[in-house]
Amino acid sequence: MGTADHVDTYAGAGGTHRVEIPPPQPFSESLKNTLKETFFPDDPLRQFKNQPPRRRLILGLQYVFPIIEWGRHYTLEFFKADLIAGITIASLAIPQGISYAKLANLPPILGLYSSFVPPLIYGVMGSSRDLAVGTVAVASLLTASMLGDVVDAQQDPQLYVHLAFTATFFAGLFETAMGIFRLGFIVDFLSHATIVGFMAGAATVVILQQLKGVLGLEHFTHKTDVIDVLHSIFTQTHQSKKRANLFWISAMAPLTSVILGSLLVYLTHAEKHGVQVIGHLKKGINPASFMDLNFDSRYLPIAIKTGIITGIISMAVRGDGSGRSFAMFKNYHIDGNKEMIAFGMMNIVGPFSRSAVNFNAGCKTAVSNIVMAVAVMATLLFLTPLFYYTPLVVLAAIIMAAMLGLIDYEAAMHLWHVDKFDFLVCMAAYVGVVFGSIQIGLIGLSVLRVLLFIARPRTLVLGNLPDSKVYRNVHHYQQAQTVPGILILEIDAPIYFANSNYLRERISRWIDEEEERIKSCGDTGLQHVVLDMSAVGNIDTSGISMMDEIKKIIDRRGLKLVLVNPVAEVMKKLEKSKFLESLGMEWVFLTVEEAVRACSYMLDCKPQDSEKYTNIV
């Protein structure tokens, strides 16, 4: 990093473009534009413009029920593919549904219910053609953990089931409201790195939880951290019997594992020799569960909390791109807010339905979910007695096999190679889930990461690239040279209450460091501090107060503050706060090059010429 002799002289204001204050705009118009950009960036209502009432009605129905739109073009070839995919998914959903219900300490039959009604709803309301829906292991585990702190599933199973229904109901209300009010962007606060670590940590915890079924332990902790799980295992090792000999079945397909495991138990009467089995499953489709909702004030807070947290986690799992990646591959669009409404309605109507089993079996449309629901219905009506002899160790093995697929080693290594800070975030999420709790590992860490990015924005020192009018980060471009007597800083984020104090301290430190460098090198004394505000998209009252303080600090040092390219919103607020009047519009420039020319002119000219320049501008 060197120092360039800036020989250009400033010719005056005549040839310089000025930064303009935007024309006044009514508050109602500003509020309308802000709300539109926040909640409707994709402008979903544009398709209704200039359309007759009948067409608007049809478009509205197609928006809520996408099946109306693509159903008109449905073909026999599509049905063949969907039939195969639906049966394939059902073979996965049936054993996984039963397994995940056990993971949530719920009756196994509820796992089948969750693979019946919800897929029907999603087949009609979902916008993804490739997303299969059913239970989610992480949400099941979290439900067991949070409700288990209040109600013991063994001592009061009826109350526990009712609270699970109630929590699911609130999860549905939460997701539906998020979709209707277009708040899906909230899930974007959960970064990809956090989700990768979270999913791996959750998979680790779920696998450890399955040691209960593998080892045949009757009493097991409902907590999710690894310390409590291992303590529960090692304090009951004397209860373990030789039941792990069926574990090899897990290497096969889930449904095959169930069939072979059940057949083996039936032929050997292993249930009479200590092998735990599912037992009786009630035949018939699921009854309405609205009468089972529990709004008792003693339990309502935990039900609402469980519903909201499991809803957020389910949306995070879905929002990490599974359905979206399939849509991009097949060249169609997914509306995230419509997806939230569909999943919310699934949770409201279907008992204990959790979403986002991401499985693509060659399906063409969401009819594959309907086929899966029909297959599950046939199972509920005719085949549930066949699951009586299914050993619990097989269900545990199915869950463990499914969880291994959630540990994405390649994604973690990619984070290490691309962004080591993201890798540390990923590992922190993993450790947070395994040694703390699922809430800490996902939500707490994601919020902390966002706050750190907001509260600690980057500030960069800019220098001039030789033989050009371009100014770039001196630590990025080694040939960039600072300008004598001028410190050029770029602020790389909006200025809010969360980062205003940091920016004040950081800018002051940049000035101190520059003056120390000048003193040690014997260069021209510092006279101007130029703030490039091109990347400052907005500023609040705390930020304006910070700018006032920075100006006072710079004035006390005998320096001059110069601003470059404040955007319209920033200019409007600086003008209304009288900051521009205090600074002087002559010290606000459109480009860094113009600001440097003006400052260099002021450094080269005599005091009376300096006053003359100010009067001209």
Image (cartoon, rainbow, N blue to C red):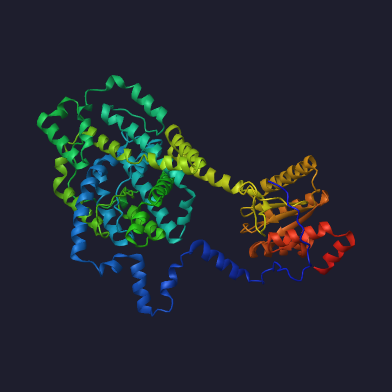
Q: Residue furthest front?
A: 467
Quadrant into which the C terminus falls: bottom right
Query: How many numbered discs?
Result: 0
Can the viewer see residue 100?
Answer: yes
In this view, 48 is above or below 152:
below
Q: List x then y, in percent, for residue 390.
A: 18, 36
In this view, 248 is above or below 336:
above
Can the viewer see residue 159?
Answer: no
The residue under the point 28% across, 49% down is 114
The residue under the point 37% across, 62% down is 333
Q: Residue furthest left?
A: 267
Q: Depth check: 207 or 102 in front? A: 207
The part of the image, by quadrant, that contains residue 404 is top left
Q: Depth check: 60 or 360 in front? A: 360
Q: List x then y, in percent, for residue 239.
A: 27, 21
The residue under the point 24% across, 55% down is 362
Q: Depth check: 323 or 370 in front? A: 323
Q: Residue furthest right?
A: 608
- On the picture, is 486 further left or further right than 225? right
Q: List x then y, in percent, for residue 3.
A: 73, 49
Q: List x then y, in percent, for residue 434.
A: 42, 33
